[in-house]
Amino acid sequence: MEPGFGVSIPRLYAYHRALREASAAGKGTITSHGLATLLGETIAPTQIRKDLCALGARGRRGHGYAIKPLSAHLAWVLGLEHDWRVAIAGFGYLGHAFATFLAARERRFDVVAIFDRSPQVIGQEWQGVRVDDIADATRVLRAAACEIAVVAVPAEAAQGVAETLAGAGVRAILNFAPSTLRVHREDGMPVVVRNIDLAGELSILTHRLAVGTMPAVEEA
């Protein structure tokens, strides 16, 4: 659950993505059951109705929800009504894959700065963006005006890299390093950090396989 909404933000994003898909297919309305189908039945229709009701969205019985206004409202809640400039620190396999994913799938997130510490990587270009030395991050980031950064560096380097990013004005960090980050900006305000533990996520699957508990509907 997310503070201030009482609704899972990943679920809201899933709804928004499904609504875009439905709109692209020429649909003007959709029911909670229709949304559930687009989501692969991973979220129950009752949960969808509960979440959307919490945001003030009301569907018409027998007709469902009007897609365009609901999609616009979710975009506003999720901060997707405008584009975001993103920096990636660490351009190994994971950093490169994440940048490629954003370019292919998520048009609201524009990778404008990339950093690494390897001499073999520094100076290369990815889709017109130069890979700079992480030592130059402060100068490059202040010129690029990035508010979001992705950290994909080894655990022992993650905290220092995050502090450098925060000092250059980054306000939010998506952290893939196996290390919990606690970062503040120069004005003392905390940086929003989302720690993504890929091995931990896999362990949830291995646990359920091991004990034989595979729910039909997964919580998001």
Image (cartoon, helix red, strand yellow):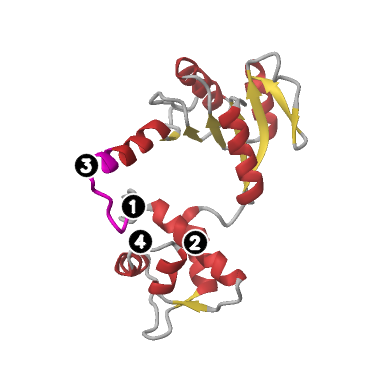
The span from disc 2 to disc 1 (Cα, nearest Å) is 19 Å
Q: Amino acid at mark 3?
A: Val
- Which is more foreground, mark 2 or mark 3? 3
Q: Which residue is mark 4?
A: 43
- Which is more foreground, mark 3 or mark 1? 3
What span is colored magenta in the figure? Answer: 207-220
Q: Amino acid at mark 1?
A: Gly
Magenta-span inclusion, residue 218: yes
Q: Earlier in the sequence, mark 2 or mark 1?
A: 1
Q: Which residue is mark 1?
A: 4
Residue 24 lies, in percent from the top left, at 61, 69
Q: Earlier in the sequence, mark 2 or mark 4?
A: 2
**Occupied quadrant, residue 144:** top right
Q: Earlier in the sequence, mark 3 or mark 4?
A: 4
The span from disc 3 to disc 4 (Cα, nearest Å) is 22 Å
Q: Amino acid at mark 4?
A: Ile
Q: Secondary structure at mark 4?
A: loop
Q: Which residue is mark 3?
A: 211
Q: Secondary structure at mark 1?
A: loop
Q: Mark 3 and 1 residues: CB-CB less than 8 Å, in contact?
A: no
Q: Amino acid at mark 2?
A: His
Q: Earlier in the sequence, mark 3 or mark 1?
A: 1
Residue 16 has which mark? 2
- Which is more foreground, mark 2 or mark 1? 2
Residue 193 lies, in percent from the top left, at 43, 34
The span from disc 2 to disc 3 (Cα, nearest Å) is 33 Å
